[in-house]
Image (cartoon, rainbow, N blue to C red):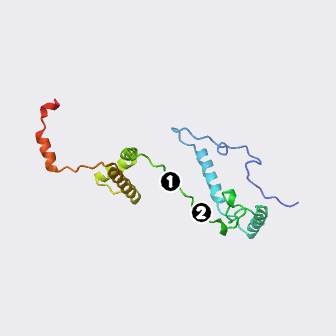
């Protein structure tokens, strides 16, 4: 009969120690006991021991066999680079024949110039951008273009309607201010 090496596994002979049992977290005010600290250190050491990859070529060989099996199981249609048509009309046509003609925008029904002018004057976005310009802030290129287009349209509508902006002189304003009777507003 051959000799057997003695082992010191806890499960064989000895009863479980307090330290080997998983302890719940100690209360916040209570210090961990020596048994709990030892058990925690043992667990951390186990984790550190088995940290790296397993050694030897036999492990990597098993992984490569699994990878080959996975490749065969994949759907061959996955990852196709062929363009998928989104409109039913183009399903049977070739890629070169798919030149899409630009859809002509329907001409907008012309609004009454007075109504259009009123809408432009009440446009919140335009008013905010104009306020930012008055404060001296820089606008982005898109915003500046939008403001320019709107102001050009306002001028066009005003000339079309015959409304002229009266540019008053500073002197005229000063004279008007001097003539006003303050007692009228009491």
Q: Position of residue 36 (x, y in %)?
A: 60, 45
Residue 61's spot in the image, x, y percent?
Answer: 76, 68
| Residue position for label 1 | 107
Camera-side mark, 1 or 2: 1
| Numbered label attached to residue 139 | none
Q: Are marks 1 and 2 in contact (CB under 8 Å)?
A: no
Q: Residue at x 60, y 51 (%)?
A: 41
Where is residue 47, by image quadrant? bottom right
Residue in the picture at 66% in, 69% down: 96
Image coordinates for residue 52, horizontal then vertical, percent: 65, 63
Task: Tell me the residue at 73%/69% (across/down).
Answer: 56
Residue 126 falls left or right of residue 20 = left
Please rate how many residues cluster around mark 1, counting C-alpha atoms within 10 Å: few if below 14, some from 14 to 19, many from 20: few
Distance from label 1 to label 2 (Cα)?
Answer: 18 Å
| Mark before the other along the chain sequence, 1 or 2 | 2
Which residue occupies the foreground of this view, 111 or 61? 111
Q: Which residue is mark 2?
A: 101
> Residue 182: x percent and y percent?
13, 34
Q: Secondary structure at mark 1?
A: loop
* 161 horizontally vs 107: left or right: left
């Amino acid at each position: 009969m051959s000799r057997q090496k003695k082992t010191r596994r806890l499960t064989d002979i000895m009863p479980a120690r307090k330290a080997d049992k998983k302890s719940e977290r100690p209360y916040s005010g209570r210090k961990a006991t020596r048994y709990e600290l030892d058990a925690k250190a043992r667990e951390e050491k186990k984790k550190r021991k088995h940290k790296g990859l397993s050694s030897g070529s036999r492990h990597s060989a098993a992984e490569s066999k699994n990878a080959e099996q996975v490749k065969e199981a994949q759907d061959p249609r996955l990852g196709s680079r062929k363009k998928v048509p989104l409109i039913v009309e183009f399903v049977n046509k070739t890629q070169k024949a798919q030149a899409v003609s630009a859809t002509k925008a329907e001409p907008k029904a012309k609004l009454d110039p007075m109504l259009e002018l009123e809408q432009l004057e009440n446009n919140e976005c335009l008013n905010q951008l104009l306020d930012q310009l008055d404060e001296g802030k820089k606008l982005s290129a898109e915003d500046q273009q939008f403001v320019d287009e709107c102001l050009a349209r306002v001028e066009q509508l005003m000339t079309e309607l015959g409304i002229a902006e009266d540019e008053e002189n500073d002197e005229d304003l000063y004279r008007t201010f001097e003539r006003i009777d303050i007692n009228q507003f009491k």
